[in-house]
Amino acid sequence: MAPLIALVVGAALARLAGLAGVEPLDGWHPALRVGLALMFTLTAFAHFAHPRRADLIAMVPPRLPRPDLLVTVTGVLELVGAVALLVPATARWAAAALALLMLAMFPANVSAARRRLTLGGRPVTPLPTRIVLQILFVGVAAVISFGP
């Protein structure tokens, strides 16, 4: 749930800043970019921080090679995407790329739920909840990519 909280709180605070006169954040579209960037920054750090990294490596479906490398690469892509979301000239492309990345990583979430793995000592998000969250996250990225 931490990614959802980061998305919602980040977007809400950015929107409030926009309403308070921070012109680049004046509107829901830039606020959503900030929220999604915060969410991806949070999730990216889990790709490198011990012990979460080991949990993420375990989540990679067993049939895929080099799960350690896959976790590193996806973490780097998340960080690059988060930064690119904050640059108006690259935000749309970054949101589209991050949506594709989320779709590509979704099988790892399915695999982890089916194998009843843990993340940070807690069971991974149950699959029905994870599907709803995935739709929300990809939807926000789509709004940013195709919105105003």
Image (tube, grey):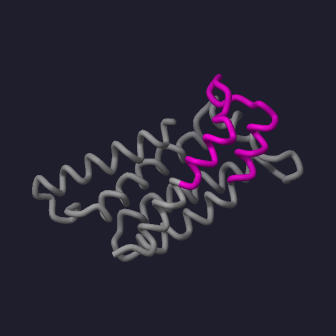
In the drawing, does residue 76 fall left or right of residue 142? right
Question: How far across and down, in percent of the image, does residue 84 sit?
Answer: 43, 66
For the point 48% across and 74% down, the residue is 93
Which one is nearer the viewer's eye here, 134 or 75?
Answer: 134
Residue 48, magenta (yes or no): no
**In this orientation, which residue lies closer to the viewer: 115 or 83?**
115
Instruction: Indicate the position of residue 38 as horizontal and vertical percent values.
Output: 41, 49
* Quarter location, residue 30: bottom left
Which residues, given as a range, are shown in magenta?
106-135
The C terminus - image quarter: bottom left
Our reading of the magenta stretch's main secondary structure is helix
The residue drawn where x is 67% and y is 27% is 123
Identified at 85% across, 53% down, the residue is 65
- Residue lying at the far right in this picture: please name it: 63
- Image: 40 above or below 29: above
Question: Image quadrant of residue 145?
Answer: bottom left
Location of residue 73 in the rendering, given as x and y in whole percent from the top left corner? 66, 56
